[in-house]
Image (cartoon, helix red, strand yellow):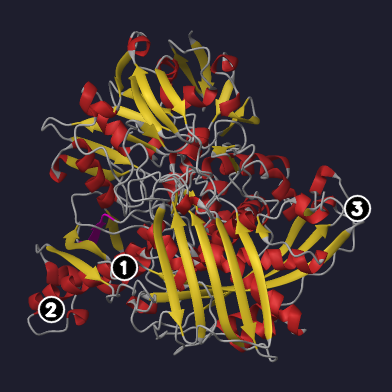
Amino acid sequence: MSLTPAELTSAVTGGIGSSPQRPDGNLKVRGEFAYASDLWHEDMIWGATLRSPHPYARILSIDLTEALRVPGVYAVLTHQDVPGQNRYGLEHKDQPVLAEDVVRYQGEPVALVGADHPETAQRAMKRIKVEYEVLKPVVDMETAVDDTPLHPGGNLVRHVPVRRGDQHATAEVVVTGRYEVGMQDQAFLGPESGLAVPAEDGGVDLYIATQWLHVDQGQVATALGLPLEKVRLTLSGVGGAFGGREDLSMQVHACLLALHTGKPTKMVYNREESFYGHVHRHPAVLYYEHGADRTGKLVYVKARIHLDGGAYASSTSAVVANAATLGVGPYDVDNVTVDCWGVYTNNPPCGAMRGFGAVQAGFAYESQMDKLAEALGLDPVDVRIVNAMSEGSVMPTGQVVDSAAPVAQLLKLVRDKPMPPLSTTVDLRDLPGGVSNTTHGEGVVRGVGYAVGIKNICFSEGYDDYSTARVRLQVINGEPAALAHTAAAEVGQGLVTIMQQIVRTELSVERVTILPMDTSIGNGGSTSASRQTYVTGGAVKAACAAVREKLAKLAGGRDPADLDLAGLLGDEVIDETVEWRHRATEPIDPETGQGNAHVQYGFAAHRAVVDVDVELGLVKVVELDCAQDVGKALNPQAVLGQIQGGSAQGLGLAVMEEIQVEGGKVRNPSFTDYLIPTVLDMPPMSIDVLELADPNAPYGVRGVGEPPTISSTPAIVAAIRAATGLALTRVPVRPEHITGT
Amino acid sequence: MRVNVTVNGEPKQADDVWEGESLLFLLRERLGLPGSKNACEQGECGSCTVYLDNTPVCSCLVAAGQVQDREVRTVEGLADGDRLDPVQEAFVEAGAVQCGFCTPGLVVAAHDLLDRVPRPSDPEIREALAGNLCRCTGYEKILDAVRLAATRKADPESAAR
C-alpha cells in the first residue's frame, strides 16, 4: 500500500443537485482505502506515548535508564528533546508537546518511546520512572476562576458578555432553571494515527488523519524548529472527526521520533488512549431566566453559562463566543443579558465537537421554552412559533439575519408529521430494554417532544476564513478531463464527491479526478463549522470560473458552450488556482457582545417520540424526525446522511454518552463503558429538507453538518419529560434520573 | 512463533509472531491486509469483523495463534475481482459509506446475515448489526443498503441491471 493516497475518480457521475456515488466508496467497501492507521513503511518503527496518571502534579524527575535498555528500543524522548517551541494550541499556545515541570490533566503526554514493535514500546514505557508530587486538582468549572491558577494568566480563558435592550426588563411570567451538560466524546471510529517519514533535506513528511492540514503544519514546524517547507503533510484516510481532530494529537510526537531515529515512525492510538488523546465537548452548567408575557412572547432572557475548558485552551475561546451569541436560540428577544465563561481546570481538555457551544446552550434554552409553555399552559410548539425568528430578525449581537430563517416552518413541519402508531403486539425489539426482556409493555409510557436550534456556519468574529482550490482542464485520451486539488480535509462527509459535482457542473466535463489533499497547495481551512461545502466548494467553483475565462479566450469570441470542448482545448492545459473567501465578519464588542460576528445561520427542528420504562428508567426512542433548511442540497443523499448522523450524535448526548470524570480522572475510557448509539438505539427518521437559497453563498448552500446535532438532544429529553413528568435538567439522562433511585 | 493460515483462499505464513498478537494485528501488520479495522480493539465496535471458518468474529479478540491451519475470509476477499459483492455494491449506492471505518465490519456482518436470512425484516437487520458501531450515518442508510442488497441477491435480474 502506497503512502500517498489514491487519486479518486468515479464511474457514476453527476453534477450538483444529484447524488452520484462517492469516488472513494468502492475502495472503502473493499477494505482498500488507506486510512492513517493502515500505513506501512519499510524499516518503520512504532511510537508510544507515556501519559500522566494524575490530573495535576509536579514532575520531580524522569529516569529513562531502564527503558533505554529494552532491546528493540530506538529512542526515549522527553520535553528536552523538543527542538523548537514546546508550546502549541489552536487559539492560545499554552500546551506543551511533552510536559515539562508540571502535568495539568490525566493523560497528558510526558515521554515518547520509539521501538521495533508496539509491544516493545509498551514494555519500555513501563520502565520509564517518573516521580510526581501530586497536587490537588481544580475540577469545578463554576469556581475555577478563583481557584489555584493553572496557567500564568489565571484560569479564565474567555468571558463573553452579550447585552441587548433593557437590562432591567420585567415580565408577567418568569421561569428559571439550572441545566447541566455532561462531557461528550466525538468517538470517531478511526483512532488517532499517522506515519512520519524523515526526509533527506532534514525535514519530515507526515501522513496523517486530521481536520486541517495547514494549521497542523504550522504547529508541527514551530515545535520542531523547522521552516514550513520542511514539514510536509499529506492527508491519509480519516475515520471520522466531528471536531476531535482539530487539535494536534500525535503529529509532533511521530515527527520527533522520526527525526531523532532517522526511521519512519508510525503511531496509532488504541481506543483507551484515544479518549485521552483528543479534546471533548465542553461540559456546561447553565443558569437561565426567561421572562414572557401571557401570550408567551418573550420579554427578556438572562443566562449565565459556564464551560469547562479543561487543562488547555484548545478552541475554548470560540466555543464561548458561540454559546454566548447563540445563547437565546432561534428566537426574537429584545432584551438579552448573557454571560459565558470558559475556564481552565484539571479536567480533560475540551474543544471542538459538532455543534460547538451551540449544543450546550441549545439544551438549556429549549428546556426553558418547554418550561415556559408549561407555566403558561401553552403548547410547546406554539410558544416556540410565537417567538420564532425569521429573515430580518435581529440577533442578540445586533446582527440582522439576512437570509432565510424558517424557524416556524421547520417546527410546523415536524409537528404535522403523522405519529408512529403505538405498538399493538409485544415484540421485545420494539420495547425499552429490547431483547433483555425487561418489560412486555408494563410500565411503558410514551412521550413526544420538540426542539429547534440555531448554529453559525463558517468561522466567525473576523477570522480570515478562506480556501484554496486548483482546477486543471485538459484533453486526455481524446476526452476533456478535469482535476481538482485542495488541502481541505475529507473526513468522511463527502467533500470529494461535492468537489467532483461542482467541477462537472461548472465545466461540463464528466471525468473529474480529485488529487490527494496535502500542503503542496494553499490552505483549505478547517473541516469544521459546517464550512467545507460552502468555502472549499466556493473555491472550487471560483477556480472553475477562472478556467472558463481561459476557455473563453481560446474560443476567441465564440461561446465555448457551442463548441466541442476537446476540440477547443486541443493540446492546451488550463490550470488555475484560486483563493476564495466568504464575506467578512467582525469581532464582537468585548463589553456588549455586539457585532456582525457570523457569516450564516443554520436551523433544524426535531420531533422525538419515546417510550420510557418508568420503572427501570430505560428509554427507547421510537422515532426522531427532523426538518432542516440546507439552502441548496448539492448532494441530497449526503445531506440526509449528515442529518441522520448528526441526529444520532444528539441522541447519544440525550440518553447515553458521557465521559465520566471524577476528581479530574476519566472513569470510562472505552467503548465498553462509553456508549454510543447502535443500530438498535437509533430509530427511523422522517426528514424534510428545505432549500431556501442563501443569496450570499455559493449555489445558495447553507451548512448542514451541525444544526441537527443541536435540536436532537433537547427534543428527546422533552419527550422523556412528557412521558415521565420529571424535570430532567441534565444530559445525558440516566436511568436513575428517571427512577429516582 | 510461526502461523500458517488460509486467508481469502490463499495459504499464508507469518514468522516471529509474538504470542500476544491478535488476528487483527496479524492481518493488518504482517499479511498486508489492513481492510479489517482497528477502531476499539476490545470487541465492542465490530469494525474488525472477519469470517473464521465461516463464522463472523471480532478479529481483535482472536489470538493470532488460534488461527493456525484455519480459514479466514476478510473484507478484501468478498469481491470477485473487479465485481463487488452485492452487499458492497449496495453500501456504495445507498450512501451507507461516509468515513468508511465501520464499513468493512458492517459489510462482513451484513454479508453473513444475508447468507443466513436472505430476506431479513428490519428488526432482524437491526439485531444482526447491533454489534457494529457506526458514528457517521445514524444507520439509516446502512439499513437501506442491506435491504437493497437483499433485494438484489433475491432477484439477480435487478442485480445485473
Disc number placed over residue A25 in the picture, else none? none
What residue sits right under mark 3 in the picture?
A440
Confirm whether residue B81 shows in the render: no
What residue sits right under mark 2 in the picture?
A552
Identify which residue is drawn at 31% across, 43% down. A5
Label 2 and label 3: CA atoms lie apart by: 71 Å
Q: Which residues are magenta?
A: A479-487
Query: Residue A37 colored magenta?
Result: no
A629 relative position to A545: left or right: right
Q: Which label sits in the foreground, 2 or 3? A: 3
Three-letter amino acid code at disc 1? Val
Residue B59 vertical placement versus A627 (above, below): above
Three-letter amino acid code at disc 3? His
How packed is label 3: few (under 14 Cα within 10 Å), some, or many (20 or more)? Answer: some
Q: In the image shown, does A712 or A430 lie closer to the viewer?
A: A712
Give how far across and how far down residue A46 sits, in percent. 36, 24
Residue A339 vertical placement versus A251 (above, below): below
Disc number placed over residue A535 in the picture, else none? 1
A112 relative position to A622: left or right: left
Three-letter amino acid code at disc 2? Ala
Q: Are marks 2 and 3 on the same chain?
A: yes
Query: Which of the two discs, 2 and 1, labels the residue nearer the N terminus?
Result: 1
Query: Which of the two discs, 2 and 3, labels the residue nearer the N terminus?
Result: 3
How packed is label 1: few (under 14 Cα within 10 Å), some, or many (20 or more)? Answer: many
Q: Secondary structure at mark 2?
A: helix
Q: Which label sits in the foreground, 2 or 1? A: 1
A630 relative position to B70: left or right: left
Q: Secondary structure at mark 3?
A: loop
Label 1 and label 3: CA atoms lie apart by: 51 Å
* Chain letter of the residue beneath label 2 in the structure image: A
The prevailing secondary structure element of the residues shown in magenta is strand
